[in-house]
Image (spheres, helix red, strand yellow):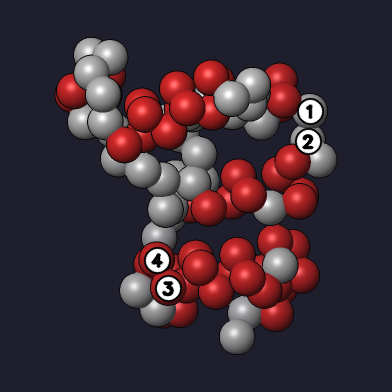
Amino acid sequence: LAPNTCVLIGPTLAARMVSTAGGISELSRIPACNLQVLGQHKATSASRAGMSTNIAAAASASVASGGNVAYKPHEGILSESDLYRAVPSHLQ
């Protein structure tokens, strides 16, 4: 499908990116600065105000269960790759 992308982020994430973009040609038209947010959950004004939404509820449930996962608005599919996770958090 996309051999270079598969090597960098893995075949599963590469397939998800192609699917989310709407195809390989559409993915190739997306500017590089927008690739980091491809597949992110859209925040609503209610979630920014602290009201309960699916994203806010999931984040609070994760924190309540002892998880350390917080919703980060500028992370999409690429944030799930091993390459991204290997980078120190202050450089992500």
Q: Mark 1, residues whose alpha carbon is within 10 Å: few (<14), some, or many (≥20)? A: few
Q: Say the numbered circle drawn on residue 87.
A: 2
Q: Which residue is mark 4?
A: 20
Q: Are marks 4 and 3 in contact (CB under 8 Å)?
A: yes
Give the quadrant of the C terminus: top right
Question: Disc 2 marks which amino acid?
Answer: Val
Q: Residue at x 59, y 25 (%)?
A: 65
Q: Is residue 41 shown to the viewer in this render?
A: yes
Image coordinates of residue 85 in percent, x first then y, are 74, 41
Where, quadrant-wise, is the N terminus in this rendering? Answer: bottom right
Amino acid at pointer 4: Thr
In the rendered image, which residue does mark 1 sit on?
A: 88
- Identify the residue at image location x=42%, y=73%: 19
Q: Residue furthest top?
A: 49
Q: Nearer the viewer, residue 39 or 34?
A: 39
Query: In the image, what residue type sits under mark 3?
Result: Ser
- Vertical comparison of 52 with 8: above or below: above
User: Number of numbered discs present?
Assistant: 4
Residue at far left of view: 45
Q: CA distance from mark 3 to mark 2?
A: 26 Å
Q: Secondary structure at mark 2?
A: loop
Front one among 73 and 56: 56
Q: Which residue is mark 3?
A: 19
How far apart are the alpha carbons under marks 4 and 1? 27 Å
Labels 2 and 4: the sequence-earlier one: 4
**Mark 2 vs 1: CB contact within 8 A:** yes
Circles 1 and 3, Cβ within 8 Å, touching? The answer is: no
Q: Residues within 10 Å of mark 4 (few under 14, many from 20)?
A: some
Q: Give the residue furthest to the bottom.
A: 1
Task: Tell me the CA gap for discs 4 and 3.
Answer: 4 Å
